[in-house]
Amino acid sequence: MVDLPNSTHTVVIGAGQAGLIMSHHLRQAGREHLVLERRDELGGGWRDRWDAFQLVSPNFVTGLPDFPYDDSDPDGFMTRDQIAGRVAAYAGVIDAPVALGTAVTRLASDPASPGRFLVETNRGAVRAEEVVVATGAFHRPRIAPTAFDPAIHQLHAHDYRNEAQLPPGGVLLIGSGQTGVQLAEELHEAGRSVTLSVGHCGRVPRRYRDRDIFWWLRSLVIDGPRVGAELPSVDQLPDPRARFACNPHLSGHGGGHEEGPRRGVAHDSQEVRVES
């Protein structure tokens, strides 16, 4: 376990891929820094996903700075443990100074040194000139109030691991983002009667002209400016609320495919009820 210094130039909070990429850039710049991770093992938030989770994006887009994807299945889709393992391996590749088991409990201005930060953790405090928060989003489930009978078993996707956790009977899934449609597919394949309550998430094709949709998205980022077809910036969006649009329905299961909940999940509109 890395010892906590009394002070450092930069503290990075979170050792998922964002925090480790920041560590890589700080090291390249010769900047003294420390990465704090509340978990006792590397791998980031991927380790919190359910057992059968697979990435929606293909393996060829999992490259990290100085750590490109060079394995034998670029068009495959990593499982939960594979992507967590890849993130963990990256910390070793870049020799990131990660302090595991170190939860940040408070971040505040340093009363003893104006302009600096005081990062309080479960292992003591660290003073820093700069702090980078790389913890990601969606840490606290947003559960809408419902009129369900309290006797009905209710489980948030964050706590779901596999179908065996659920009592016998039908399952109502609320939310049709990528998590919702993939869990509907998984539960349907396990023999459950599934009803999916859908929202406004849209659809995109899994493949276009024999290329995965992520190949085209990556091409927009890399080559778009050269051909005048770059991705829009926030100020170019037709509506600022588009920043919060949910991700379109795609799945990495079974070699990857698109999901169409309004046409039926798991490719069988007769087996999965879909309600708006």
Image (cartoon, helix red, strand yellow):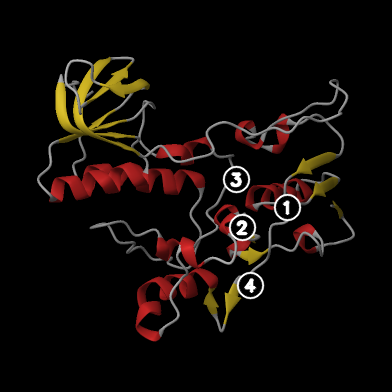
Secondary structure beneath disc 4?
Answer: loop
x, y percent for residue 211: 52, 78
Q: Which mark is residue 253?
A: 2
Which amino acid type corresponds to the residue marked 4 in the rendered image?
Pro
x, y percent for residue 268: 83, 62
Residues at marks 4 and 2, CA–CA distance in whole angstroms: 15 Å
Answer with the quarter of the image where residue 113 lies. top left
Which amino acid type corresponds to the residue marked 2 in the rendered image?
His
| Label whose residue precedes the other's in the sequence (3 or 1) | 3
State which mark lies toward you, 3 or 4.
4
User: Is 153 displayed left or right of 250 in the figure?
Assistant: right
Asked if one can make out residue 85 in the rendered structure from this viewpoint, the answer is: yes
Numbered label tally:
4
Quickly name the residue at label 1. 185
CB within 8 Å, label 2 to label 1: yes
Q: Which mark is residue 52?
A: 3
State which mark lies toward you, 4 or 2.
4
